[in-house]
Image: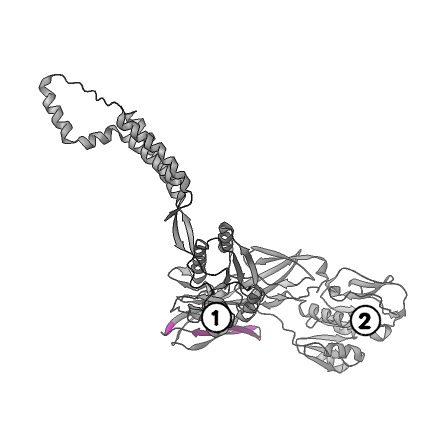
Amino acid sequence: MGFNQLPFLLTAIIPLTVLIYYFFRKKYVEKQISTTLFWDEVMKETKASPYLQHLQRNTLFYLQMLGLILLVIALLQPYWKTKSIAGDQIIWVVDTSATMLSKKDGQTIFEGHQKEMLDLTNRLGGKAVTIITTGTEPQVILRNETNTKTIQNAVKSLEVTYANEQFPTTLDFLQTFISKKSTVIYLFTDAIERDQLPLELPDVKWIVKGAPDNLQNISLQRFGATKVEGQLKAITQVKNDTSKEQQVTISITNETGKVLTNKKIIIPANKEERVLFDNLPDQTALTAKLKVEDDYKVDNEITILIQQNISKILVDQGLQQLVQKAFQAMDFPVSIVPSLQLGDSKDDAIIVTNQTRLLEQKKQPVLLIGRDDKKAKEVKGELKTKDSNLFAYAPIKDVYVNELYPAFRDYKTIATIGDAPFIQISPVGHIAVLADIQMTDWPLHPSFPLFLWSAKESLASSGSDIGTFSPNERRIISLAGTGGGEKGYEIFTQGGEYIRSFEDGNSFIAPTKPGLYMMKSGNEEKRFVVTLQQQEKVITKGTSFEYGETMDKKATNFVQQPLVPLLLLLIITLLLVEWEVQRRYGFTH
């Protein structure tokens, strides 16, 4: 214990003066005795309890003296020494992956680490702290922050992002913050091996805070469904990572939460089981849930969409070879099909052709380039485009077009040459380019392959579903099936909770929590699913250890814990007690 303001010790003269005055004052005790016969009895009672009576008569005085002494001590600013964190530079790396939600004794790993960080803030001793969270794109929450309150607020605001921790990326990013100072790095995670750390760094000490031991986990590893003759067949894969045999219940629900079926199974220790579900009613989305008591609940549920999957692109053999080569250059299966066989295809594919009769079918999306039922006419004028996300990545400029085919009725025009329609979108989402490629110089422009890619993405997502994402996954998506790119989309959970807005043409970032989500824009609605990554379905044994030493390892660092707040609280309490004594007994004589 120590004092920061010893000169204030001179203020002790105030209570000493009061005390000296008290001892030299005249003392009188008034007593009314009805007769001298009772004098002896009164004296006996006085002598029997002199200290108690003295205290009763002088309670207010002693309370005031104690208050003055405490005030003098408070002016000296006393403190209590506690050992502080070593190192000149302190970095906290916080794992925010889904496995941090494993729970032991009613507390998640993440909550336990937050409490440890809050405790460490009281032992910083004015040292600066940098906080970094893990992930594919590590985030810097604080950098060289010394204010204790700011650090504590930042720690309390940390949240689990469910995405995999990606330690190689995070640790590479971390090394850019390590300076020539002595550095102590706290790594708050569930488990990490020593050989994963860059231990060759000089003057760096690693302190790893891991998960508790013996976490029990039974996980739903995979869930899939396929449509056969109007009915669904589903399969689940359940894994038991415990050392005991487990009984679990698997339930299948639709998107409204209605239970379609359930099964009870017994899984041996450290084994996997596959469970089949037949004759499920036709649904657009299914959710599989595990009902079991374990320490990690996040991997007990998976949602999938039942949707048409575009497996390839079928290009009409009669089209110009530049179109064929442009599609073949994409990272997507492409087949060149004879014109007469194109309409007989039963694959879930995008058809690229000039046969207008194929526009009448709705099963397969069509990209029409030219027309085989009309004759083209010469056109003149400037090429103009409307706001559509088909042009978000491929703005068409300075393209020369010699001839155009007649336009389709009831199609939305998104590009024109003069007043004549050049590119249109049908009510069901087909895209029509009203010119043969050889009628233009478009292939000489960079926008040509980019437009074909955008058209492919648009046609592939022209339904109500846009696919499956990992938590916080960043992806470029196209939603221009009906030309809706001029509108923004709002993202909601299945229960209707608003998440955020998304402007089409921007990079899409999936929500954090796994589940089924909706994207709405006016009357248009699209669905997508966020699913947990496979790495986040495995609970590894927790590891906590320390490695390395800093150059100041022999130095003893202390932080001062002030006692003034406690003293002020005691002084206020004494004042309240004094007020109560004075109210009851009045001033003492």
Image spot of residue 153 (x, y percent): 50, 52
Q: Quadrant of residue 469?
A: bottom right
Residue stretch rendered in magenta on the structure: 219-246
Residue pointed to by mark 1: 537
Give the secondary structure at mark 2: loop
**Spatial CA span between label 2 and label 1:** 47 Å
> Which circle's residue, 2 or 1, is located before the other in the chain?
2
Q: Nearer the viewer, residue 200 or 207?
A: 200
Image spot of residue 355 (x, y percent): 78, 75
Residue 142 counted in the magenta span: no
Q: Is residue 589 left or right of residue 529?
A: left
Q: Are dots 2 and 1 in contact, CB under 8 Å?
A: no
Q: Is residue 35 visible?
A: yes
Q: Nearer the viewer, residue 325 or 256?
A: 325
Name the residue furthest left: 37
Q: Nearer the viewer, residue 170 or 422?
A: 170
Give the secondary structure at mark 1: helix
Residue 229 counted in the magenta span: yes
Q: Is residue 50 left or right of residue 185?
A: left
Q: Is residue 80 left or right of residue 493?
A: left
Q: Quadrant of residue 84?
A: bottom left
Image spot of residue 33 (x, y percent): 15, 18
Does residue 572 lie above or below 129 as drawn? above
- Magenta segment, principal secondary structure? strand
- Label ID, residue 445: 2
Does residue 39 lie above or below 491 as drawn? above
